[in-house]
Amino acid sequence: MIEYIATLEPMTQAIIFTLFTWGMTALGAALVFTTKTINLKFFDGMLGFAGGVMIAASFWSLLSPAIEMGEMGPLPNWFPAAIGFLLGGVFLWSIDKVIPHLHPNAPLKDAEGMNPEKKRRSTLLVLAITLHNIPEGLAIGVAFGAVAAGYPSASLTGAIALAIGIGIQNLPEGTAVSMPLRREGVSRRKSFFYGQFSGMVEPISAVIGVLLVTLMQPLLPYALSFAAGAMIFVVVEEVIPSSHENGNKDLASMSLMIGFVVMMILDVALG
């Protein structure tokens, strides 16, 4: 299977694996067809697990290769990784300031169960998850582009591990969109549609990532660390706080550690 994937163009590889991550988002959103509510402990555990996956992926699949690639440039090897990482965080911070949004666990109803702005708030929730899927797709595209560029620190199995890890953490993201919409009275079909729609940006941003590194190879270590910085910002700003909002901090924290270890094993074993 790996041998066949290696024969494909990097653009095709990135599209295939981001279609997988999109499908995982849709799978999470599909839970809306089986139940109208979800166990909050289970959901917070899923969010914590997703955070651990993203943190591990940010280092092993993105930052570490960026530092190694920096050794081939005229600047200190840490410079591209440091600058790209900070730029990724600043980019997501800027988007958060310009475009209002809700946290994944933000309640869509007030204390009386009614909210005159529920449509607007639901839209903001969908927008939040959609925007934060952009760096994930970008990371996958950049990872496959790095392999095509022939950098020794980049490996096809590592790029695949990154896509698998992001796909795993996309499950709770799809659920985080579809379930609140369903609780607001939106039909199951529409709730599922909006939930899976949040993952649609990943194939698009993956294509951009591949184009960036194949057309402008000197930018590769910056692009890898940029994606890492953006993902870490999402974890700190959205995922971890959301996993703690229902009082399940210990469960979320242990789930984060488990997610970190799972992604670390995937990346090290496959990479």
Image: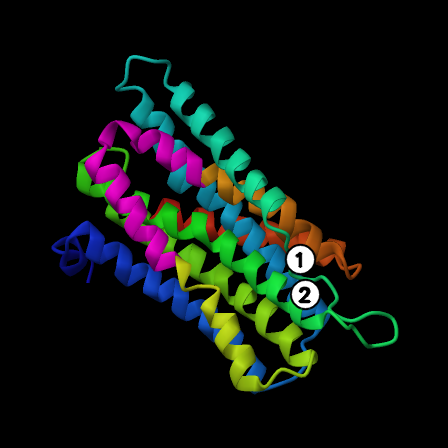
Q: Position of residue 162 (x, y in %)?
A: 38, 51
Q: Tell whether position 208 is magenta.
A: yes
Q: Residues within 10 Å of mark 2 (few under 14, many from 20)?
A: many
- Nearer mark to the viewer, of 2 and 1: 2
The circle on residue 166 is: none
Quadrant including the N terminus: bottom left
- Comes first in the chain, label 2 or label 1: 1
Residue 96: % across, % down: 60, 45
Q: Amino acid at mark 2?
A: Arg
Queried whether the magenta region covers residue 79, the answer comes back as no
Query: Which residue is at a point 67% across and 83% down the rendered structure image?
Result: 185
Picture quarter containing residue 20? bottom left
Is residue 226 at least partly visible in the picture? yes
Discs 2, 1 touching: Cβ within 8 Å: yes
Q: Secondary structure at mark 2?
A: helix
Classify residue 145 by image quadrant: top left
Describe the colour scheme in one phrase: rainbow
Look at the image and tell me whether residue 270 can be seen. Answer: no
Q: Amino acid at mark 1?
A: Leu
Q: Which residues are magenta?
A: 202-227
Work out whether 96 lies above or below 122.
Answer: above
Relative to the observer, which residue lies in front, 185 or 231?
Answer: 185
Residue 29 spot, x, y in % from top left: 52, 74
User: Where is residue 39 shown, x and y percent of the image?
Assistant: 70, 74
Identify the residue at the far right of this view. Answer: 112
Q: Would you name the residue on which mark 2 appears?
A: 121
**Disc 1: which residue:** 102
